[in-house]
Image (cartoon, coloured by chain):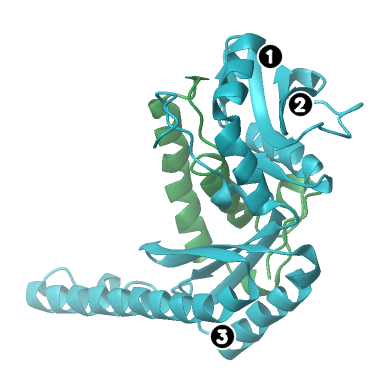
Amino acid sequence: MIYLYAFCDAPAAGLDGRTGFAGRPLEALSAGAVSAVFGRIEPPAPPPIPENLWLHEEVAESLMTGPAVLPVRFATTFADEPALRDVLERHGSRLAPGLDRVRGLVEIGVRILAPADDDEPATRAVPAAGGRAYLQVRAAEEHRRQSRHAEVARLGGDLHGQLLPLAREGTFSDQRAPMTAAAYLVPPAAVGQFRGQVEQFARRHPGVRVLCTGPWPPYHFAPTIPRDGDNHA
Amino acid sequence: MTDDPPDVSLLELLDRLLDKGVVLSGDITLSVADVDLVYLGLRVLLSSVETARGLSSSAASANGHDLPVRVL
């Protein structure tokens, strides 16, 4: 079975001596301007446990020293090499612009989290007999919780507005309360300035936690290839 | 392993490896049940993140891996 880690500019370089799952050497298959970096494994595909996820990530990161890399979603496998070659040949026209988009750039993640609520829920202090009081306290707790989430979403949007001009591209989501998640494509030389901006924001808003991670391979800026093999999505 | 919060780095990792990256046609063997299990774990992680302290001043090198992942 073929386990696919990433696509990169052809020819893939620096694979010598590097290994992936089961200690198998990394190999490359190229078609036109695109190389697929893969390893051979025995089925089934590795389960999504942290050790395996980190190993996939390490392989993708090891390719970041090259000009452009598009990491592939975890556990993408093919029956054999011809099946992978078929994908390369059919979708090269989509993968090559995908590499152009991220060439010379890294991904930085920025997340804002609601503050840890240090207080014990007030409802625990309310005697069970006080039914009405209990409900009132619960309603007040829920109101505070929603207010915290709204504040996190607002601050996340503010920070996104400040960071976007420093990045080539950016994505932002506030759909998973109580946090926001954003990702940016940034030239490596600008990472320091970018992080500085995030740190400044974090100092101004000590009531929330601001997390900045990376550099990552550009997961958020990789193309989606239609499952049916159609090139006109 | 350090005292740093590996759960935050793992959360960032999960969001990328399971939800982003190039998604291709092919023999994808990660079943929906597997993904659900991971995200069930993720919800546990999220509660852990919610109760973790002092994250804002920590630097994470998750699971002891020497990765270029840092947390402000």
Is A142 positioned to the left or the right of A164 in the image? Answer: left
Q: What residue does disc 1 label? A: A41
Residue A123, by quadrant, is: bottom left
- Nearer the camera: disc 2 or disc 3: 2
- Residue A174 at what x, y percent from top left? 39, 66
Q: Residue at coordinates 55% horizontally, 51% vertically from top-left?
A: A220
Position of residue A74 relative to residue A140, above or below, is above
Mark 1–mark 2 contact, CB under 8 Å?
yes
Q: Is residue A205 visible?
A: yes
Q: Are marks 2 and 3 on the same chain?
A: yes
Which residue type does callout 2 highlight?
Answer: Gly
According to the image, label 3 marks what residue? A206
**Chain B display color:** green
How crowded is the residue under tag 1: few (<14 C-alpha within 10 Å), some, or many (20+)?
some
Circles 2 and 3: CB atoms closer than 8 Å? no
Quarter of the image where one finds residue B52: bottom right
Label 3 residue SS? loop
